[in-house]
Amino acid sequence: MRPTEDIEKRIKNVNIVIDSESNKRVFSNILKAFEKSTAKDLAPTDRPNIWRMIFRNPITKLAAAAVIIVAVGLFLGRDRHTPSNPTAEPRLIAHSTLKKMSLMSLRMAYQRGGFDALDRQFRDTLDALGPQSLSISMQDLLEGANGF
Amino acid sequence: MKRIRNSLLVRTVFVSLAMALVASPVLAYPPDPDNAALLYYQGILTLVELNEEARDRIRDVARAEVTPDEKVREDISKCIGAIQFAEAAAQVPACNWGVQYSQGLDALMPQLAHMKVLTFVLVADARIRASDGDYKGALERCLMTGIFAHHVGDDTLVSYLVSLSVRAMVYKCMQDIIGQAVNDEELLGWLKNELATSSVYTLSPVKPLKIELEIVTDLMQMDNVEKLARILADSDEKKMADIINKADKKTLEQARRVYSEHIKSALTVFSTPMRYEQAHSKLKQLANNFDPNDPASAAAGAFIPALARILTLKTRTETHANAIKAAIDICLTRAKTGRLPVTLPTGLPKDVFSGKNFKYEKTADGFILSCRSKDLDKDEIYEYEFKVKK
């Protein structure tokens, strides 16, 4: 008889009487055991080797292979969604453009050339900040939220 | 009997609790923003699809350089989200753009550029409505843009100047629409009342000058000498190093004193009722009163804005507003009598440049209201033409 079958048989044959006192006692024991066995308290040698556990069992081996295949598929799929158009890449705002939006810079622009100069500066800001495409699909919007 | 009473009591308590839960404000959906800027920012976000050509087309219509065509109507139809957000924002009195004043003169204000685009969108929409004969809708849009101008605010001198430019565009649009709606007495009466009761046209340069006074005097401290040198040297490394080497506590203290005295004198001029010409002369004198060979005086002078020009723009905007109000009265006379008055009716708002009544002149197309004193910076007399629909 395999050990798991042996355990199942023993559990079936046990005559368990459940009362509130037993409940409390069991729960308290579980809590104590849990507190003792936190990963922090375990020495590295005490920790179970996850890779050994996976590869010892053929079912977990298959499951791990499936997880790897799905992860690779998702990774490649993401790559395919990336637009090849260079303009769609996120743009970095140059430091000089940022400076143009500062209170001092706008004030100096007006001081030097009145509203025309201020308008030119606004135009430069707009050229740096927009327009950007709003054609974002719901899939793009929710990308990375698969865990929810 | 007692059990029945208890049961009734329990039921009543449960029903009351259930009612309280249903009516509880905790369960109600959250309120709309109480800060108009949040709504404008959302509106601005919906404008990102407008490309440069579309922006130019909308700007040209807003400035009345071209009449609205199908293309610009299509452009404006894409801005409906922004317009709706601006409509909602106009209902909210408070507006805080979230400027980081702690950054002093380095505070970034990227929203100002977008405000200009939003103004073009709103005014272009008003002009499209007017070209379709919907004068009430067009004027409502103008009034709403006036609220936007107020929301742009006067926290900084630049935002105050942008606010003035938004108002100037609104008044130009109203100027063009009023003459077209000359036969609609009810509409003109409504507009007159709206302008008379509106409190949105009360921005002044006093508040931004006070804020600048705080920012600049804080900047003129030894702790901020590098920042100060960068601004004074306009990022010229050699000049910057020279300023840092020469700056000391005493010079900066003197610079702060000179700067504060000048700004305080300017604040007195802006806060005291006086004629444009007199105020302009005082402010011009204040701006020129710096010794370039004295480091403290030169440093203070670098931060003094073009005070006289600011006064002129303020005066010009107020004069334009008064011209609109005066024109509404003239058009009301035309609506009532069928004819334009021969002379200017009495008791109308005045030309703020001269403090006198506008010069009124009838033309073949309508009438012109002219100022009696000139813009002393540009040496120009402003005229406001109103073309009246036959």
Image (cartoon, rainbow, N blue to C red):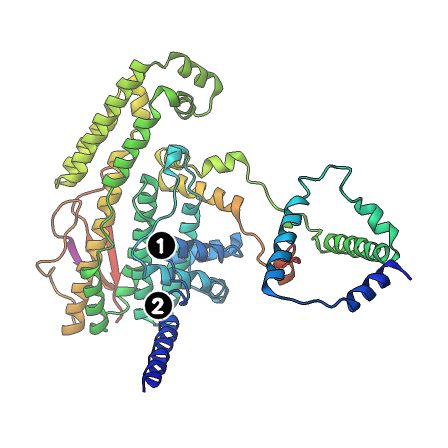
> In the figure, residue B189 lies in which quadrant?
bottom left
Name the residue rendered at 29%, 44% in the picture.
B154
Horizontal and vertical percent for residue B290? 26, 21
Residue farthest toward the right in the current orientation of the protein: A1
Label 2 and label 1 in one chain: yes
Residue under mark 1: which chain is it in? B
Q: Amino acid at mark 1?
A: Asn
> Which sits earlier in the primary sequence, circle 2 or circle 1?
1
Name the residue rendered at 79%, 47% in the picture.
A50
Q: Main secondary structure of the magenta part?
A: strand
Q: Nearer the viewer, mark 2 or mark 1?
A: 1
Residue underneath mark 1 = B35
Q: Nearer the viewer, residue B277 or B122?
A: B122
Q: Nearer the viewer, residue B109 or B383?
A: B109
Taking A120 as reference, is A81 above or below it?
A: below
Q: How far apart, in angstroms, are the residues tagged by discs 2 and 1? A: 30 Å
Question: Is residue A6 something that shows in the picture?
Answer: yes
Residue underneath mark 2 = B130
Is A11 left or right of B128, judged from the image as shown?
A: right
Is B99 left or right of B47, judged from the image as shown?
A: left
Magenta stretch holds residue B363: no
Horizontal and vertical percent for residue A52? 84, 46
Q: Secondary structure at mark 1?
A: loop
Q: Amino acid at mark 2?
A: Ala
Horizontal and vertical percent for residue B67? 41, 63
> In the figure, residue B169 lies in which quadrant?
bottom left
Magenta residues span: B358-362
